[in-house]
Image (spheres, rainbow, N blue to C red):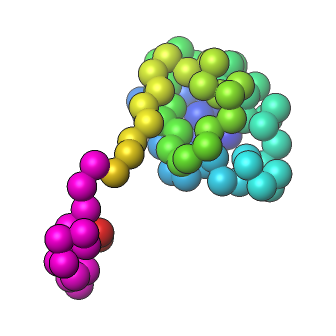
């Protein structure tokens, strides 16, 4: 919150923030207020599945990713240093 509201950063990424929101570990209202009152020059990127609809409504851009093809389906096993 402090990083976003300070205006010191061009972009702040909140990686996998949807999970603390879904499980109630982080108050949704607090996140919404922070996003709504952020300085306009600060871009905020939120990641994670099952994003609350209130955040989707507030967002400028929303992307949903889905698996199309996976190496494991072709018998290729995971390799050290490469995330599958």
Residue shown at the point (53%, 39%) measured from the top left? 46
Q: Is residue 62 visible?
A: yes
> Which one is nearer the viewer's eye here, 72 or 19?
72
Q: Is residue 6 above or below residue 68?
A: above
Res 32 → quadrant? top right
Q: Which quadrant, please, contains the C terminus?
A: bottom left
Q: Is residue 64 left or right of residue 67?
A: right
Q: Magenta segment range?
A: 68-82
Residue shown at the point (67%, 40%) measured from the top left? 1
Q: Is residue 25 left or right of residue 11?
A: right
Image position, residue 51 (x, y; %): 62, 38
> Which one is nearer the viewer's eye here, 58 or 72?
72
Image position, residue 76 (x, y; %): 17, 77
Q: Is residue 1 left or right of residue 46?
A: right
Q: Is residue 10 left or right of residue 34?
A: left
Image position, residue 68 (x, y; %): 28, 49
Residue shown at the point (17%, 71%) measured from the top left? 74
Q: Is residue 38 visible?
A: no
Q: Main secondary structure of the magenta part?
A: loop
Q: Is residue 69 magenta?
A: yes
């Amino acid at each position: 919150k402090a990083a976003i509201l300070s205006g010191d950063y061009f972009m702040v990424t909140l990686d996998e923030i949807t999970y603390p929101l879904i499980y109630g570990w982080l108050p949704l209202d607090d996140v919404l207020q922070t996003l709504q009152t952020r300085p306009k020059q600060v871009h905020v990127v939120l990641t994670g599945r099952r994003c609350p609809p209130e955040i989707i409504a507030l967002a400028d851009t929303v992307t949903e990713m889905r698996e199309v093809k996976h190496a494991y389906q072709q018998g290729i096993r995971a390799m050290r240093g490469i995330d599958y």
